Image (cartoon, rainbow, N blue to C red):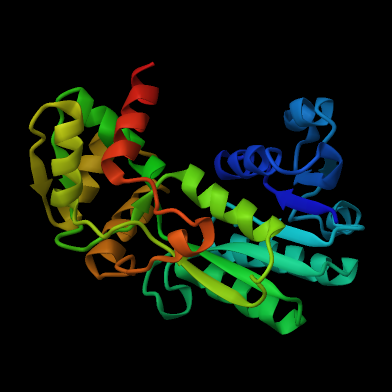
Amino acid sequence: MKILVTGATGKLGSKVVETLLKTLSAEQLAVSVRNPEKAEGLRARGVDVRQGDFDRPETLDTAFAGIERLLIISADGDNETRIRQHSNAVKAAERAGVKFIAYTSLANATESTNLMAPPHVATEAAIIKTGIPYAFLRNNWYLENEIGSIQGALAGAPWVSSAGVGKVGWALQQDYAEVAAAVLVGHGHDNKVYELSGPLLTQEEFVSILGVVLGKEIPVQQVNDEKYEEIMKGLGLPDFVIPIVVGIQESIRNGSLEVESNDFEKVLGRPVTPISEALTQMVKEISL
C-alpha cells in the first residue's frame, strides 16, 4: 500500500507526514509538492518526493501514479482558484486509479454559509462523482489561526472581534493531522464524513481561558464589521486580505462553525486536546 499526501511541506501537511512516519516506513509514503526542493529533508529520510502542481494537471498524473490512498489537502487562494485546482487534483486521482481519497474540507460544508465553503462544496461533489471511496475531514477551525491575536494579547492589546456570540470549535492542527493520518492508514472510513470540532466556545469564553493561561485579564472589544475592518487596516493587513478576515468574523457570527461533534474521539479513540492545554502549548511555542 502506498499513501500520498499533497501540500506536504505546508503547516498541516508536514504534521500529517510526521504523524504517518510514526507508523509507516518511509517507502510506503509519497508526497506531492509544488517545489520538491522544500521537501529535501523528507527525501533524505527515504520518503518518495514527487513534483505535483494543482495548476498543471500533467504533473499530477505522474505524482499520483501507483498511489492507493490519497490525502488532498485543500489549497490556498480565492474560491475560484481553489475550485479549479481541487478539480484538477480529483480528476488526476481518478485517472491514476487511486482507491481512496481523504479530503480536508470545512465544517458543515454542504450547508455552510461560510465565505470559504464554495470550494469545499464543489470538491466534495467532484470526489463523490468519481465513485472512489472517500472520507471528508470537515475541519472546524485551527487554533493556529489565532496566533496573531494571541501575540497581540501577550503584548497587552485587547482581543478585537465582530463575531458576536458566534461559536467556534477550535482545535490544534496536530489533532486534525492525527485524524487525517488515522483515516489514511486505518479501515472502515469509506464514504464517511467526519465533523472535526473541538468544544464550542464564543470569543469571550475562548479569551477567558486564554487569560487564565497567560495569568492576565484580556479585554474583549466587540465591534461592528466596519470598525473591525478599520482596525485590521490599521494593523497593516494587505487590502486583499481585509474582506476575507471581515467575512470570517461575519461567518462565525452567523453560526457557520457552530457544529457540535465527537468525531475527533470517534476516529482517534481519545478526546481532542483540551483548549487550555492546547493554548498553554501554543503560548510556549510563541514565547520561544
* Vertical side of 282 occupied by 55: above or below: below
Horizontal side of residue 186 vs 284, given as left or right: right
Placement of the C terminus among the 4 image quadrants: top left
Q: Is residue 275 left or right of residue 23?
A: left
Where residue 208 appears, x then y in whole percent?
A: 13, 42
Instruction: Using the rendered view, name the quadrant where residue 282 is placed.
Output: top left
Q: Give the image quarter of residue 207.
A: top left
Image coordinates of residue 111 in percent, x first then y, are 41, 80
Residue 258 vertical position relative to residue 143 in the rendered view, above or below: below
Question: Relative to residue 48, is residue 178 depicted above or below?
Answer: below
Residue at screen point 33% across, 58% down: 169
Quarter of the figure that contains the N terminus = bottom right
Q: Is residue 46 left or right of residue 256?
A: right
Residue at 91% of width from left, 54% of height from top? 62
Q: Nearer the viewer, residue 269 or 27?
A: 269
* Residue at 34% over, 69% down: 259
Residue nearer the viewer, 30 or 19: 19
Number of numbered discs overlaid on the protein picture = 0
Q: Position of residue 199 (x, y in %)?
A: 29, 58
Q: Nearer the viewer, residue 283 or 149?
A: 283
Question: As drawn, is 102 to the left or to the right of 59?
Answer: left
Compared with 10, 85 (above or below) is: below
What residue occupies the far front of the structure in this picture? 269
Q: Position of residue 157 (x, y in %)?
A: 15, 30
